[in-house]
Amino acid sequence: MINAHPTRVTILGSTGSIGRSTLEVIRRYPDRFEVVGLAAHANIELLTRQAAEFHPEYVAITGPNATAFNLPPNVELRTGPHALSWLASIPVDVAMCSVVGAAGLRPALAAIDAGNRLALANKEPMVMAGRLIMARALECGVPVIPVDSEHNAIFQCLSGHRVEDVRCIHLTASGGPFQGRSRDSLRSVTPHEATRHPTWDMGAKISVDSATLMNKGLEAIEAMHLFGLPLSKVEIIIHPQSVVHSLVEFRDGSILAHLGVTDMKLPIAFALTWPERVESPMGRLDLTAVRELTFAAPDLNAFPCLGLALEAAAEGGTAPAVLNAANEIAVETFCQGRIGFLDIEEVVRRVLDASAFEPDTDVETVERADALARDAATDICSK
Ligand SMILES: NC(=O)c1ccc[n+]([C@@H]2O[C@H](COP(=O)([O-])OP(=O)(O)OC[C@H]3O[C@@H](n4cnc5c(N)ncnc54)[C@H](OP(=O)(O)O)[C@@H]3O)[C@@H](O)[C@H]2O)c1
């Protein structure tokens, strides 16, 4: 049954890659959606254009240039570090959380507390505090619909099945732009090369994470929390064609796969309209054009960031938050051209080695671990 009233949507991070794709889906179905809120950090120019086109009631800007924003009439604006949580807590049908990094943690919790269905692209909060987020969602009766294509695929494959029947999930990884390259040849990689992904068009941070394979480690942790699985049931498999978006293997030997076009608008549309489906906004996958589907084990020697993430996942507690914070600082510093590509893993390793982990009992503990790890990583990067 199609909703009688438009789905009210807030987009946290509307100026980013996922945020822009979300607005493209909404643009395709103008009668189906109503944009209630938009948020950006620094890209005031694009946010201004988006506000003029989609007429949100509420806008949030977290970065320093908020005063340069020309408000359309009747828009309520909040600025500053708490503006995103304020926007997330305004009642809507779906809150799309598509900011990058740890900045999405409090807003994701605020959306859940307000009873807003969470369409979650922003994986870092799940890595930091996935156990706490999922517990809060369960308590509030709020569905969390994954937007990350792999998790969205697994969510769909699991639908109608019992988690106890899952032998394992297979998270597919394209392998990033440097798949098959020797470790030595990675020393001279530039930020420009690292942000050019072969199959997905994404923001800078996730592109670098894909190049180091840290992204797949973050996704393994995200999957553990989203689906309530132990690390032993999360397998990573390299699949360069990015046609199979992930697979679920059941104990009877059956493997269910999700295939689709390589376009984030597919999982975004799913998350916005769940449990209904709409006509594909980006065409169909031509199966006859799919020449081959290949699968291979990841090379942990060439890409140790994946190994570091799996170690942090096995450690548990605040270890994933420390890993994530160190990685965010290292990637940012790499993108500024101040450290090399292989230094990213070095920074993360050193911060993990120097940290004492605690149980992830509450958000404050996780945030404390995050702050300490950021300081440690910044210190290492500046030497
Ligand atoms: N892109 C993909 O295909 C993809 C796929 C799967 C999962 N994801 C996940 O989705 C999230 C977003 O990725 P993306 O590629 O869309 O990133 P992106 O293009 O870099 O966009 C990030 C968005 O977050 C905002 N932002 C940046 N720093 C912020 C801060 N400190 N506080 C509040 N907002 C902030 C940005 O605002 P300004 O533009 O104003 O700076 C922008 O709207 C990431 O967690 C990523 O891992 C992305």
Image: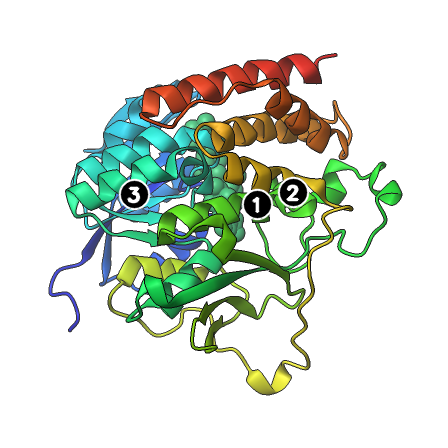
Q: Which mark is residue 307?
A: 2
- Residue at 75% x, 25% y: name it: 339
Query: In which quarter of the view is residue 189 placed?
Result: top right
**Mark toward the viewer: 3 or 2:** 2
Q: Residue at x 70, y 33 (%)?
A: 345
- Give 130 or 314, whichever is nearer the viewer: 314
Residue 134, labelled with which disc?
3
Query: Looking at the picture, how far across and down is residue 348, in whole percent?
Result: 64, 28
The residue to which callout 1 is attached is 217
- Give the percent coordinates (x, y) of residue 56: 25, 41
Q: Where is residue 264 shown, x and y percent of the image?
A: 48, 59
Above-or-below relation of 122 to 243: above
Task: For the residues labelled 3 and 2, say whether their Cβ atoms are less than 8 Å apart.
Answer: no
Instruction: Check if mark 2's residue and mark 1's residue have beta carbons within 8 Å.
Output: yes
Relative horizontal placement of residue 92, taking residue 322 as reference (left or right): left
Q: Amino acid at mark 1?
A: Gly
User: Between 226 and 235, which is closer to the camera in this rendering?
Assistant: 235
Q: Which mark is residue 129?
A: none
Q: Along the horizontal axis of the image, is 197 left or right of 31?
A: right
